[in-house]
Image (cartoon, rainbow, N blue to C red):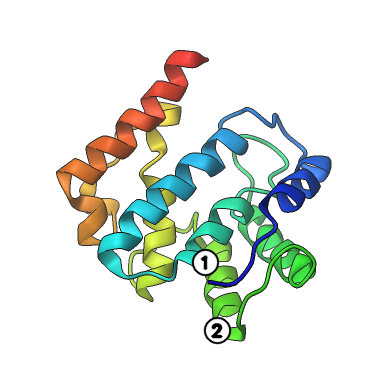
Amino acid sequence: MRHIDRRALIAHLRTNFKINWHGHHGIPHWARVRVNGLMLAKTTGANTHVVELFAFFHDSCRVNEYTDDGHGQRGALLAKKLYSHFFEATEQEMVLLTHACTTHSDGLSKGDVTVQTCWDADRLDLGRVGITPDPKYLCTLAAKDHSNLNAAHRRALSWISRE
């Protein structure tokens, strides 16, 4: 497993974050996406290093909570910029990470299992905005599994109850 200086990375991301740090696309969402992704990776065999980095970067460059075309691409570019400063990754991991970030809002379902796991980890957190994830929009069998789907949805709903 390659190194991530999580504390320093998150501190850096926070200094440049443009929207509510604790909002729908902020740090609580990133944490749940991380947990969802690592949960799914146990079954999918996804690269957990990429999955974890995806959780931090996929929404890190949003400029609003609503429609924000290009935010995934901006997150991917930021990951490339911060590579070797806050985390290590192989060239292939960077390819997977930037692809997952760039396309995570495009509704795609086909691709590398690590990228699919990233997309599913994000989609499983739709409960935070009042949407129950529909298995037909999920990529992996692990995400469609009722126990994983329900566990992720409960996590998302518990955040709503705290708001």
Farthest residue, direction right: 15
Between residue 106 and residue 95, name the one nearer to us.
95
| Label 1 SS | helix
Residue 76: image quadrant is bottom right
- Please determine whether, in this image, residue 94 is positioned above or below residue 106: below
- In the rendered structure, which amino acid carries the disc numbered 1? His
Rendered residue at 70%/65% (across/down): 79
Rendered residue at 77%/65% (across/down): 82
Farthest residue, direction left: 146
Q: Which residue is mark 2?
A: 92
Please tell me the numbered disc located at residue 49. Answer: 1
Q: For the residues labelled 1 and 2, say whether their Cβ atoms are less than 8 Å apart.
A: no
Label whose residue precedes the other's in the sequence (1 or 2):
1
Q: On the rendered structure, is 62 left or right of 99? A: right
Q: On the rendered structure, is 72 left or right of 108? A: right
Rendered residue at 82%/45% (across/down): 16
Residue 66: image quadrant is top right
Label 2 neighbourhood size at 10 Å, few (<14), some (14-19), many (20+)? few
Q: On the rendered structure, is 133 left or right of 49? A: left
Label 1 neighbourhood size at 10 Å, few (<14), some (14-19), many (20+)? some
Rendered residue at 58%/60% (across/down): 53
Q: Position of residue 32 (x, y in %)?
A: 46, 40
| Label 2 SS | helix
Q: Position of residue 62 (x, y in %)?
A: 68, 45
- Please determine whether, in this image, residue 21 is positioned above or below residue 77: above
Please tell me the numbered disc located at residue 98. Answer: none
Mark 1 vs mark 2, foreground winner is 1
Q: Position of residue 115 (x, y in %)?
A: 43, 68
Q: Position of residue 11 (x, y in %)?
A: 77, 44
- In the rendered structure, which amino acid carries the disc numbered 2? Gln
Between residue 67 and residue 31, name the one nearer to us.
31
How far apart marks 1 and 2 lie (CA) works out to 11 Å
